[in-house]
Image (tube, rainbow, N blue to C red):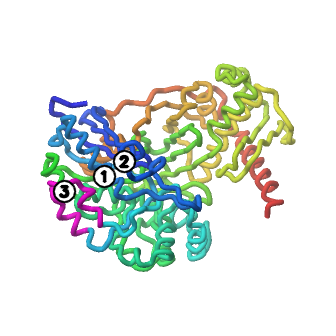
């Protein structure tokens, strides 16, 4: 993909679980170049599966830090070989898989600042890490540390109010606590702890990059209201932690100019700026160009909600992060495990394995489904913690089965009503300008999107998000270049391709669902209390 005419651009990077990827986006916000390195395929010597090592206990999951460094070497050499013109790069930013942590050994800063352009990065940084295999987001080995952290701040809800989430095993503070407890020597030899995002930014800066507010919100350590490290949380995790983390910065900050290493080895211009890297989920919010009041729904194996919030209400479920494109606002993430597999199961059972019959069932049944409500959880749900199928008729009496068409609508209405109820539980409010952006497999089904528009009372748009973290990172580079906090992000990305309108709310939808939503929430609580009873 060689590019012949000079084209001023920003680069967007994504250091994800399975690959490193880069896109180049020009001043008109067109993506004109992309490249990637796949860890398992292109770096087999590290022996990863899906980019990670799953340890014998089945809980500990790590990735080799030098694999990430070498992947950057490979991708830059591929770009150079393709004729990519680095001299046109104005700025770069990037994303990293959230929660993962990197431990720089004492003396590593010196190695970073004195890189020789004659050698690849991985040869010069191989002795710079006190932990060679770093914990990543798939790790769930820190339950004991989670309980210790919650106890230190007065419980799970108190921690959520402070940091945006209750204690989660994958969150970085708990991972750091485990390393301090189990490997105190390595911890004492660590001069800096980075997130995957700030680690990647550090490679480009040639010095330690600060952690940004948005990705820093996924650590159980940052006070999301004051945007400073919580002294109580730091103290509960490990000693001297604040100096090892460094002060956090706004996500749109220019953290410095690119290291001379890249200028001399690849031909980057000396003025090329590095904008703070952030997490992959915050970068995707930027890539989808969410604005105040908007919501993005990813309809995949799991269904994920991205919310733009003004006044967050942290809870025991979901996550609240500082917003990556507006430091005065917030974003929330809600994950629902029972997504496409549940939809396919009901399609097979009630619509003869046919999506067109599934759609006909939605078309032939009325909004509100005659008061018939269903909860469908094939595997233990996380939002809320319920398993099994639970059906209720218009009188709220439990029934064993629904007719096929009613079952299909009960599933789809139930999935979307649950999303709205739990989003509002985190402080989300639908506004007159709200847009819903739908992505993922089920976003291709217009009848499913019609139910989504009806339940939320807002228009639904579809958007291509194949590279949303990468593209969002390039957009964020332009935003940082334009002045960051002094310039609205929406102004910087106004030339980007617009999403396509797919569905608008049906006449009378708001009355139907405003009446049904409280009923659905009440039934959910009823199921929860009944299923918890015998277990406790």
Is residue 162 placed above or below 238 in the rendered structure?
above
Q: Is residue 348 visible?
A: yes
Question: Residue 249 falls in which quadrant of the image?
Answer: bottom left
Q: Nearer the viewer, residue 276 or 191?
A: 191
Image disc number at residue 112: none
Label 3 sits on a secondary structure element that is loop
Around disc 1, counting alpha carbons within 10 Å, would you say few (fewer than 14), some (14 to 19), or many (20 or more)?
Answer: many
Which segment is the magenta one?
Answer: 109-127
Task: Say whether residue 149 is magenta.
Answer: no
Residue that mark 1 sits on: 70
Q: Position of residue 292 (x, y in %)?
A: 45, 45
- Position of 518 compared to 219: left or right? right
Question: Nearer the N terminus, badge 3 or badge 1?
Answer: 1
- Position of 228 compared to 202: left or right? right
Residue that mark 3 sits on: 259
Q: Position of residue 1 (x, y in %)?
A: 25, 30
Q: Which numbered mark, 2 or 1, is in the foreground of this view?
A: 2
């Amino acid at each position: 993909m060689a590019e012949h005419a000079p084209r001023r651009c920003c680069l967007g990077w994504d250091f994800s679980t399975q690959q490193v990827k880069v896109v180049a986006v020009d001043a008109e916000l067109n993506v004109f170049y992309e490249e990637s390195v796949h860890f398992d395929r292109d770096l087999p010597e590290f022996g990863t599966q899906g980019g990670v090592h799953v340890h014998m206990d089945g809980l500990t999951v790590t990735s080799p830090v030098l694999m990430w460094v070498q992947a950057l070497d490979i991708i830059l050499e591929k770009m150079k070989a393709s004729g990519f013109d680095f001299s046109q790069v104005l700025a770069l930013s990037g994303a990293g898989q959230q929660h993962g942590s990197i431990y720089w050994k004492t003396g590593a800063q010196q190695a970073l600042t004195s890189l020789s352009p004659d050698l690849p990065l991985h040869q010069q940084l191989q002795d710079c890490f006190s932990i060679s295999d770093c914990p990543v987001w798939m790790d769930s080995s820190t339950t004991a540390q989670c309980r210790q952290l919650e106890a230190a701040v007065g419980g799970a809800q108190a921690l959520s109010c402070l940091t945006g989430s209750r204690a989660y095993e994958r969150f970085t503070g708990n991972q750091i606590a485990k390393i301090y407890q189990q490997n105190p020597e390595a911890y004492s030899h660590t001069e800096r702890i980075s997130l995957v995002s700030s680690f990647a930014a550090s490679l480009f800066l040639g010095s330690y990059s600060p952690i940004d507010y948005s990705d820093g919100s996924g650590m159980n350590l940052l006070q999301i209201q004051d945007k400073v490290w919580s002294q109580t949380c730091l103290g509960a995790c490990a000693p001297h932690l604040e100096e090892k983390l460094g002060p956090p910065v706004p996500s749109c900050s220019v953290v410095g100019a690119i290291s001379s290493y890249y200028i001399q080895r690849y031909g980057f211009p000396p003025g090329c700026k590095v904008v703070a890297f952030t997490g992959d989920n915050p970068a995707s919010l930027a890539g989808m160009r969410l604005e105040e009041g908007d919501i993005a729904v990813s309809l995949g194996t799991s269904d994920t909600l991205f919310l733009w919030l003004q006044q967050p209400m942290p809870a025991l479920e979901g996550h609240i992060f500082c917003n990556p494109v507006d430091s005065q606002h917030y974003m929330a993430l809600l994950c629902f495990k029972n997504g496409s597999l549940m939809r396919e199961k009901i399609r097979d059972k009630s619509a003869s394995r046919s999506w067109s019959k599934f759609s006909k069932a939605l078309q032939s049944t009325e909004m509100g489904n005659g008061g018939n409500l269903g909860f469908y959880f094939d595997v233990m749900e996380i939002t809320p913690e319920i398993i099994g199928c639970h059906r209720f008729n218009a009188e709220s009496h439990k029934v064993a089965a629904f007719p096929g068409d009613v079952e299909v609508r009960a599933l789809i209405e139930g999935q979307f009503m649950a999303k709205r109820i739990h989003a509002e539980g985190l402080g989300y409010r639908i506004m007159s300008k709200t847009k819903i952006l739908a992505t993922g497999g089920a976003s291709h089904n217009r009848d499913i999107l019609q139910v989504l528009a009806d339940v939320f009372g807002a228009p639904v748009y579809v958007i291509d998000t194949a590279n949303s973290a990468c593209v969002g990172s390039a957009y964020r580079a332009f935003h940082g270049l334009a002045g960051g906090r002094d310039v609205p992000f929406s102004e910087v990305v106004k030339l980007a391709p617009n999403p396509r309108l797919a569905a608008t709310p049906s006449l009378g939808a708001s009355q139907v669902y405003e009446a049904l939503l409280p009923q659905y929430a009440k039934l959910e609580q009823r199921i929860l209390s009944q299923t918890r009873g015998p277990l406790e």
